[in-house]
Image: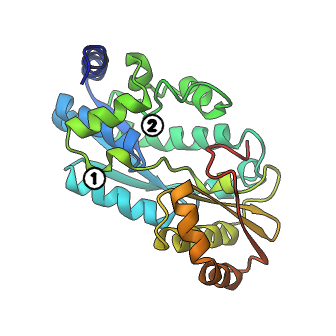
Amino acid sequence: MTERRQERYTHLRAAIRDKKSLLVSYSGGIDSTVLAVVARDVLGNNAACCLIVSPLLPLREEKAARAIAAREELQLFVRESAILEKPEFRMNPKNRCAVCKQESARILREVADEHAFASIADGTNADDIAGYRPGYQTGLAAGITHPFVEAGITKDDIRAIAKMHSIPEYAKPSASCLATRITYGECLDPQLLARISRAEEVIVAAGARQVRVRVHADVARIETDPESAERIFVLRDAISRAFHTLGFRHVTLDLDGFKSGSMD
């Protein structure tokens, strides 16, 4: 670890220590996992994490999150969100992340109050605060803290810290909620979200490292990394059949590859 990176890591630990007790908004992704592990090391039993589950969270991600928390001996609370019952979210507006963040913050606050945690934090890092991020501002307004941002910790820093803590998911690709696969303004139907989740399972089973199945009416557009694209093309017949079985009329492989936030 470079000297500058070590300074940021020291700052991170100090920022966490100052919070006295901390509940981490946890997804099983590398950002929230690293934050939860460092918080556990700094605060011991005064740190815990909360996994919020809903139809927006792919089942594979929920299972992975639970397994990682158990392996790392994290104190884990699991709560369900009824976010899809809110019309202002289900109609999939441009500010859906802000609506979801408000609901998540409410649940996190309930858990924090129930178990007497003084602060709540999420894994937003210094690279995340550029661009269109309505959820970040909503989180700030709701009292969610961002220790990585406070310490100037970037995504590369997080991966380095994960290696230092022997967290095997240090190279795990970023994930996002299933709502990001659907065009703004199109209803977030639970059955469609489930179909998308199953379609992505097909691509993961084919050996893809990174995948998003974006949906445009009856078209499923597969975004993946270049190496995985070659594998998908070889298996295109089986993948196409599986997608048709799920109800998608057309199946495409995006030649531009994976791009985070490509439907923003």
> Tag 2: Cα neighbours inside 10 Å, few (<14), some, or many (≥20)?
many
Image height of 6 relative to 254, above or below? above
Specify whether 27 is left or right of 42: right
- Which residue is rendered at x = 54% and y = 30% of the image? 128
What x and y, as percent, mark residue 39? 26, 32
- The residue sitting at 52% across, 38% down in the picture is 105
Residue that appears at 55% across and 30% down? 139
Question: Dot 1: what SS?
Answer: helix
Q: Vertical placement of 141 versus 59: above or below?
A: above
Q: Amino acid at mark 2?
A: Arg
Residue indicated by mark 2 = 109
Query: Based on the displayed image, in which of its 4 quarters is residue 213 positioned?
Result: bottom right
Residue that badge 1 annotates:
69
Q: Badges 1 and 2: C-beta atoms under 8 Å apart?
A: no
Amino acid type, residue under disc 1 in the picture: Ala
Residue 225 at least partly seen: no
At which x and y percent is residue 179?
66, 54
